Every structure is written in structure tokens, then in C-alpha cells.
Image (cartoon, rainbow, N blue to C red):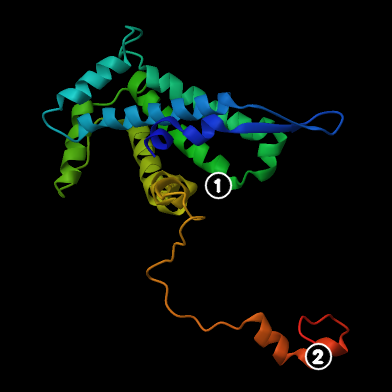
Amino acid sequence: MALEVLLFRSLFRNDCAELTGQKRAVYRSNKLLWLGGLIFHWSLLIILLRHLKFFFEPVPGCVSFLQNLDGPFQIFTPVLLVTDVLVVGTLCYLFLRRILNPQIRYISLISDYFLLLLILGIVVSGILMRHFFRVDLLEVKRFTLAILGFSPVIPKDVGIVFYVHLFLVSFLLAYFPFSKLMHMGGIFLSPTRNLKNNSRAQRHINPWNYPVKVHTYDEWEGEFKEAIKEAGLPLEKE
């Protein structure tokens, strides 16, 4: 389970099937999807952990260490964070993959594109606030701490981009339980991941199953025997 959650074991072992010109199925490695998904999820996790600085006073040392680790290169002011670049790049890759790959495009739904664009909007609005439309971080922190204390205040000098960012995050949190993003928790409830694979040696019965009145095939055939004969269909019991 740890390998599945942390390193995407199933996705790493996944193959890509294609038809050649001679209509022959060939299989090849699909490690680019695994790498893109891994980088995207880990970058998003680091970004979320970095945002804990707005919810704690004083800021935990591990959060400050993580932010310093995320921005090792003194590029721009404020420092350009590696995860910001990685998450935008992987989101664009996942979005273009759904558009350019005919097989993936065929099975993609509107919700698949919508989620990618929604997360991309959150990330881009956050980058805009950090590098182009500066906001007062002290006001943002006062705003978040006030919400945690159930005494919300209106922040000053934060600009419209902050409210766009906040709206998109709030929308994502509200939409989360009804979307495919629930795979984050569902993987822990997957029987193929957290149960022993011994169904051939031992029969597993749900303890919450209740007695159900069944109608066996023998009973059904006996009930409709004449009708089956008239229709000319074979009977197991003559």
C-alpha cells in the first residue's frame, strides 16, 4: 500500500497498447505518464504543506525548511519555487495528453478537463500573486487565522487575484467529494490493495450480509416449464 500511495506502483507497471499498421497489438512502456503523475502529486503536496505557514503562528520549523528546500535557486524576487514550475508543467502535459491522444480523448469526460483546468487556475493565480500582483502576506495570514478562530475579518490590500484564488480553492473543496479526486481516499478502501489475495484457499463472506430469499434456476425452470417447451427452448430437466 505504501508503494502504491507514495510511488504509484500500479501506474509504473502499466503498459501502453497500440495497433500497428498490420493490425497487430503491441505493448510498450508508459513511464512518462507515471513520471508526470508522480511529479504532479508530490509537487502539489509540497505546495499544500508550504501553505501551512498561513495557518500557524509561529510557523513550524519543518514548513520553513520545506520552503527553503523548494527554492534553492536565487532566481527572481521572491525566489522562484521549483514546485511551482513543476506543477504547471505536469498539468499542461496531462491536459495536452487528453487532447492529443485519440484513445485518451475518446474516453475523457468534461469533468476530466474541468478538474485539470480548475487546479491549473488555482496554481496560476497563486503564482500571479507571488510574482506579479503582490499581496500583503500579513493580511492574508490574519485572514486565515481569523477564519480558524471563527471570527472572520476582511483583509486589506490583497487585490482581486487573491479573491479569485480563494474562490477557486473553495470551489475545489466543495466539488472534491463529488469528483474523481476521491480516489485519494478510495485507494485505502480498495480490496485488491488492503486484503490478502487468498480467495482461492479461503472463502470470504461479508459479516454484514443478511439472509436473502433466492429463486434458483431449478425453481425457475419448474415454474415456466410449459412455456419453455412451447417456445422450443431446451430444458435441463425433461
**Height in image: 182 above or below 17?**
below
Taking the spot 39% from the left edge, 40% from the top edge, the residue there is 1
Q: Secondary structure at mark 2?
A: helix
Q: Report the amino acid beneath label 1.
A: Ser
Specify the quadrant that holds the C terminus: bottom right
**Height in image: 46 above or below 109?**
above
Q: Earlier in the sequence, mark 1 or mark 2?
A: 1
Q: Is residue 171 visible?
A: no
Mark 1 = which residue? 111
Q: Which mark is residue 14?
A: none
Pick whichever, 80 or 63, lies toward us: 63
Pick whichever, 187 or 230, lies toward us: 230
Mark 2 = which residue? 227
Q: Secondary structure at mark 1?
A: helix
x, y percentage for residue 32?
Answer: 57, 24
The tally of labels here is: 2
Q: Residues within 10 Å of mark 1 (few under 14, many from 20)?
A: few
Whether tag 1 and tag 2 are in contact, CB under 8 A, the answer is no
Taking the spot 31% from the left edge, 14% from the top edge, the residue there is 71
Q: Report the amino acid beneath label 2.
A: Ala
**Height in image: 191 above or below 127?**
below
Taking the spot 16% from the left edge, 39% from the top edge, the residue there is 145
x, y percentage for residue 217?
Answer: 67, 81
Find residue 95 and report its image quarter: top right
Q: Residues within 10 Å of mark 2 (few under 14, many from 20)?
A: few
Pick whichever, 42 or 214, lies toward us: 214
Q: On the picture, is 156 further left or further right than 12?
A: left
Q: On the picture, is 119 further left or further right than 93?
A: left
Nearer the observer: mark 1 or 2; the answer is: 2
